[in-house]
Amino acid sequence: MAVAVCCLGVWAADKDQPPALENKVEPDWGDLTAGYLVDLVDVELAVLPSGEPFSLAAKQGSVPDPVVRALKQWRFSAYKKNGRPIGFAMAVKVPVRHKLDSDMEQSQRPVWHLPAELNDAIKLGYDLDPAKAALMQSNLPNGEAQENLRTSLLSYYAEKGAGDLQTARKARRDLITWLIHSYPQDGILASPYAMVNAAGEPLADSEGSALVKKEWFAAVSQYPQDDVVTEGAVSFLRIADPASAWRIVTERRDWLKRSNWLGNIAAFGGLGVTALAPASGAAVATSSAKLSEDGLAVSFRKALLQSQDLKVVLSGLVTITQAGSDLAARQALPSGYDDYCRDLLKHAHDLYSGTSLNCDLKPAGMKDPALRMVRVGGNVAEARLVKKVQPRYPQAAKDRHIQGTVEFTATISAEGHIQHLELVKAPFALYDASLDAVRQWEYQPTTINGKPVAVITDIVVNYTLQ
C-alpha cells in the first residue's frame, strides 16, 4: 500500500522531522486483486508514545476493514520532546479499493441522493395547489431547516409548473437565490429542483439563470473547500457554465468526488446539453441538432477520449448513455452521438476490459438504479432499528481505561440488512467488537413513495466506562 505521510501536531510547530514508519503492513484484499477502483482517503492516526497507533479518523470518506486491520499493525519510531516520549498525530493518505462491478460502474456518475429529511417536504409540494402555494410563499419563515417549506415549493413548481409560468419562474428564482445566499449547504440545492435553465423547457428563465449563477460564484468563493457547496454549485454550473464548473472541480484536487464530477461535466459539455428537467434531472435539450463543433464542446469530448482516469471515463460514459436515452425519448438526440459513444466505450474497454457498460439507449422512463438509494441521518435510521446486538466492551480496552465512540458509514439494503460497513472514526481497541455487533443489526425497510430503497447512513457506537 503506497502511502504519503506528512506531519501534524507537535513537530509541525517545532519543524521537527516526523517519526519514521518502522513497520508497514499491507491490507489483505483477499481475491480483490483486479477489477477495482482506488480512492485516496485522508486519515489521521493518533499514535501512542510507544509508536503504536491508538485511533483512526478519516477526514473525508471512510475506510474498509482490510485497511483498518493493516493500519492497526503499523509501528512508528518513538517521538521525544525534551527527552521524553510523547504521543503525536500523523496524517496519512491511504489507497482504498472498491470492487468494480456493474453497480460500481453506474455509481461513478454523480447522482443526487434524496436526504430523508427532505422527503416529506417534497411530498408536501406534490399536494399543493396554486392557492396553497401562494399562501405558503407569502408566509415563508426567516429560516429553512425545520420545515423545509422552500423545498416544498420548489418541488411543487417543478412537478406542476403552476398555471402562470411567469409567476412560477419568478418564485423559483427567488427561492433558489435565497437558499444559496442563506443556506448554501441545503440538500435541495444539489438536486434538479434547484436547476434554472436559460432556455429549453417551459420553466426556463434566462434572467434567473444568470442570477443563480452569480449566487453560486459568491458561495464557492466564500466556502472554497466545502464539499456540499461545491456539489450544489457544480450541479447547476455544469449546464449554465460548464467551463466554470470544470475549473471549480479541477481546483479541488483532494476532493474524493473530483473524477466523478469531471467525467459528468465533460459528458454534458461534449453533448452540448443546455437544459435539464427540473423535476427529474433528465437531459431535455442540446445546443444543436448535431454534436457541436464549438471549441469547448470539442475539448470536452477530447478530454474524455484521452483521459487515463478510469473514474472520469466511466462517469462520462454512464452520463452520456443516460443523457442519450433522455434526448432520444424527446427526438432530440444530436447526430454523431452513436459514433462518439462507441469511441468512448472502446476507450473504456482499453482501460478496463471487464466493463459491463454499453451504448444501448435505455427505454424512455427507465429508472436509474442510483435513485433507489437515499441518505438518512443516524437518528432517523436508529428509529427504524428492529434488531440491535449490543456491542461488548473489550476487557483489554477496559483495563486500559479506553472509552469513546466508533463511527461507521453503513449501507442498509432495501430489505433492512447491513450490506456494507466502513470505519470513519474509532479507537482501534473498540473497533472489532463494534464491527461484529453492528453487522448483525436489522432495520425496518425505508420506503420512498411506497417503494423500498437502500439507505446510506451513519452509525455511532458509544463506549463509556462506569
Image (cartoon, grey):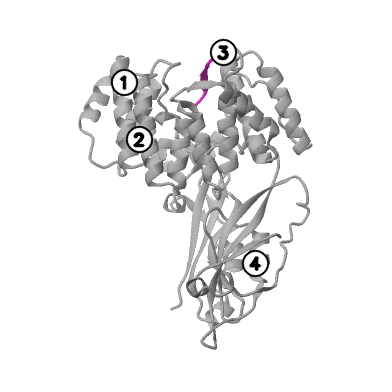
Circle nearer the viewer, 1 or 2: 2
- Give the residues in magenta: 281-289
- The image quadrant that residue 397 belongs to is bottom right
Residue 333 in the image: x percent, y percent? 60, 15
Q: Could you tell me the amino acid type at mark 1?
A: Ala
Q: What whole-number distance in Å separates the C-alpha atoms at marks 2 and 4?
A: 43 Å
Q: Residue at position x 61%, y 38% from top?
A: 107
Q: Residues within 10 Å of mark 1 (few under 14, many from 20)?
A: many
Q: Can you identify the residue that label 4 sits on?
A: 71
Q: What whole-number distance in Å separates the C-alpha atoms at marks 1 and 3?
A: 25 Å
Q: Could you tell me the amino acid type at mark 3?
A: Ala
Q: Residue at position x 78%, y 35% from top?
A: 350
- The image quadrant that residue 338 belongs to is top right
Q: Residue at position x 53%, y 22% from top?
A: 273
Q: What whole-number distance in Å separates the C-alpha atoms at marks 3 and 4?
A: 52 Å
Q: Could you tell me the amino acid type at mark 2?
A: Glu
Q: Can you identify the residue that label 3 sits on?
A: 332
Q: Can you identify the residue that label 1 sits on?
A: 168
Picture layout, residue 135 above or below residue 395: above
